[in-house]
Image (spheres, rainbow, N blue to C red):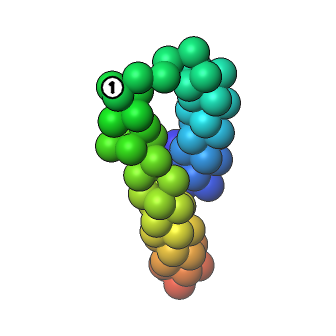
Amino acid sequence: MSLPTSRTRLVAALKELHSRWSTLSPKWRDAVAKSFEEEHVAPLEGKVRASVTAMEHMHDIVSRARRECE
């Protein structure tokens, strides 16, 4: 799988998670839900953003290496 494809899938998965969480969270309103959101859901945004940036950088490096080896 290519880096751009992986990037797209990762971003889509995060969007799907947010969509499902927004559907579930109004129905699950206790301390466990709050803890789950704070510990697992909320941190993913920054982690995915950092991962996407790294994937784009890796793609640039790999593309440049391929061009130079031609």
The type of residue carrying mark 1 is Val
Q: Residue at x 57, y 41 (%)?
A: 14
Q: Nearer the viewer, residue 43 or 49?
A: 43
Quadrant of res 35:
top left
Q: What is the x, y in percent for residue 69?
A: 49, 79
Image quadrant containing the C terminus: bottom right
Q: Secondary structure at mark 1?
A: helix
At a point 48% along the width and 22% down the height, the residue shown is 29
Residue designated by label 1:
32
Residue 4, compared with residue 35, is above or below; it is below
Compared to residue 8, the image places residue 58 above or below, namely: below
**Residue 35 seen:** yes
Disc tally is 1
Q: Is residue 59 visible?
A: no
Q: Is residue 38 left or right of residue 26?
A: left
| Residue 5 rendering spot, x and y as whole percentages | 61, 47
Residue reaching furthest top?
27
Give percent across and percent down for residue 18.
61, 36
Determine the image quadrant of residue 12. top right
> Badge 1: how crowded within 10 Å, few (<14), some, or many (20+)?
few
Residue displayed at 39% across by 44% down? 38
Residue drawn at x 64%, y 29% as measured from the top left:
22
Front residue (pair 58, 12): 12
Instruction: Determine the residue located farthest toward the bottom in the rendered image.
Output: 68
Residue sitting nearer the eye, 46 or 8: 46
Q: Using the image, determine if residue 31 lies above or below residue 1.
A: above
Q: Is residue 54 left or right of residue 18?
A: left
